[in-house]
Amino acid sequence: MTSEITWHKSSYSSSSNCVEVSEGPTTHIRDTRHRGLAELSVPASEWTALLSTLRTN
């Protein structure tokens, strides 16, 4: 069974510097200018911890 990843643009991205994420049990992160080259995949708990740290700093 193949599941479709649904991407959305980060609210912190400008029109020319875009990051897209797909959130779920695993969070996927990619650069919109190079979608096909690579993506990062991290557990949702790690993504949440990163966002929390960035918000407090």
Image (cartoon, grey):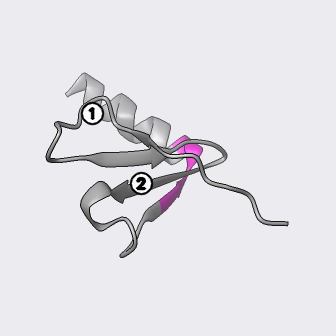
Q: Which numbered mark, 2 or 1, is in the foreground of this view?
A: 2
From what the image shows, is residue 54 above or below residue 6?
above
From what the image shows, is residue 35 above or below residue 51?
below
Kindly identify the residue that appears in the image at 16 percent across and 36 percent down: 14
- Helix, strand or loop at label 1? It is helix
Residue 9: within the magenta?
A: no
Going by the image, does 11 lie left or right of 25? left
Q: Residue 51 at what x, y percent from top left?
A: 37, 34
Secondary structure that dominates the magenta span: strand
> What residue type is disc 1 on?
Leu
Quadrant of res 49 = top left
Kindly identify the residue that appears in the image at 36 percent across and 76 percent down: 37
Kindly identify which residue carries mark 1. 54
Going by the image, does 7 lie left or right of 25? left
Kindly identify which residue carries mark 2. 29
Image quadrant in which the N terminus is located: bottom right
Question: What is the CA distance from the residue labelled 2 to the residue labelled 1?
Answer: 16 Å
Quadrant of res 9 = top left
Image quadrant in which the C terminus is located: top left
Going by the image, does 43 lie left or right of 57? right
Q: What are the residue bounds of the magenta stretch?
A: 41-45
> What residue type is disc 2 on?
Ile
